[in-house]
Amino acid sequence: MERDPTVCVIGEDVGHYGGSYKVTKGMAEKFGDLRLLDTPIAENSFTGMAIGAAMTGLRPIVEGMNMGFLLLAFNQIANNCGMLHYTSGGQFTIPIVIRGPGGVGKQLGAEHSQRLESYFQSVPGLQMVACSTPYNAKGLMKAAIRSENPVILFEHVLLYNLKERIPDEEYVLCLEEAELVRPGQDITILTYSRMRHHVLQAVKTLVSKGYDPEVIDIRSLKPFDLFAIGNSVKKTHKVLIVEECMRTGGIGASLRAAIMENFFDELDAPIGCLSSQDVPTPYAGPLEDLTVVQPPQIVFAVEQLCKH
């Protein structure tokens, strides 16, 4: 926002309250009420307003206080945000970022614990990325803001408390590149967002058992980085996808189809996919944990696939 006066933030409580998860803390005092615009509880209205602002030259960042609330703006995101560049014959670009917390939290209830990545993945004209660390959150956010395309940036509600040292110097990540988290030889584990951390927990156990898994944080949910994914598959010949998205029609289903279509001959075993269960997320803590993939399940799945 210091670098570009056209960047503004729009959403509920993003101003003087600092955002529901304090992502914009202290920014209203620095940039004023017009650039940190507090809105009523009306997602369809303020998302549509932000898309109009993008058409006229601003670079708005829309915060959905929870990604589930953006379902109220699905018409604006799909019919306007994703399509206006095309339907205007290229007369308009829509440099907008739509971001906010999603995923399964800790007993937030079904309506606040949704995994909506695949809802937006099917919309033409949108790019989608998911951050998993402070380092890639900053780099992907900068890239998304500077993009001429509409970008949906998924943040996970349980990752806001992560801390790590990040470079003081300027860096911007590519919106379409996966990250090789751990090189390995035995199996390719593809994951993103919070599940990256569950995978890394499982990897400690797997390494102690003599396995050498390769871990890739796909980061770009649309488009997939098939170059990086393909290179890994050609090396390990086995794939396990670990996601928090739902099993039916989730990111994993699309990813599995893309791998089968492009790298089928490289596979020595069926593609494994661990996903959240197709149920509304329960409020009860033990039941909530049962709906989401846990590290022991990842360990077991890798052991099974490596037997092939």
Image: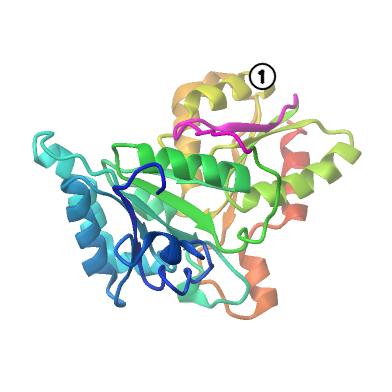
Q: Which residue: 62% across, 38% down?
A: 168
Q: Is residue 198 visible?
A: yes
Instruction: Using residue 9 as the reference point, say whether residue 252 is left or right of it.
Output: right
Q: Residues within 10 Å of mark 1 (few under 14, many from 20)?
A: some
Q: Nearer the viewer, residue 190 or 308?
A: 190
Q: Name the residue type under label 1.
A: Lys
The image quadrant of residue 233 is top right
Coloration mode: rainbow
Residue 39 in the image: state x and y as whole percent: 30, 72
Quadrant location, the C terminus? top right
Instruction: Using residue 76 as the reference point, say whether residue 104 is left or right of it.
Output: right
The image quadrant of residue 108 is bottom right
Task: Report how many numbered discs are placed on residues in the image.
Answer: 1
Q: Is residue 273 visible?
A: no
Q: Nearer the viewer, residue 279 or 46?
A: 46
Secondary structure character of the magenta stretch overall:
loop
Residue 165 in the image: state x and y as whole percent: 70, 44
Tell me: residue 1, above or below residue 16: above
Q: Secondary structure at mark 1?
A: helix
Q: Which residue: 41% across, 73% down?
A: 13
Q: Which residue is mark 1?
A: 235
The image quadrant of residue 144 is top left
Tell me: residue 95, above or below residue 232: below
Instruction: Using residue 235 as the reference point, say whether residue 49 is left or right of it.
Output: left
Say if the magenta span includes residue 176. Answer: yes
Tell me: residue 149, above or below residue 47: above
Q: Which residue: 44% across, 68% down?
A: 66
Say if the magenta span includes residue 3. Answer: no
Considering every residue shown, the one lying at the far bottom of the view is 284
Residue 260 in the image: state x and y as whole percent: 49, 29
Q: What range is drawn magenta here?
A: 168-185
Residue 294 in the image: state x and y as whole percent: 71, 57
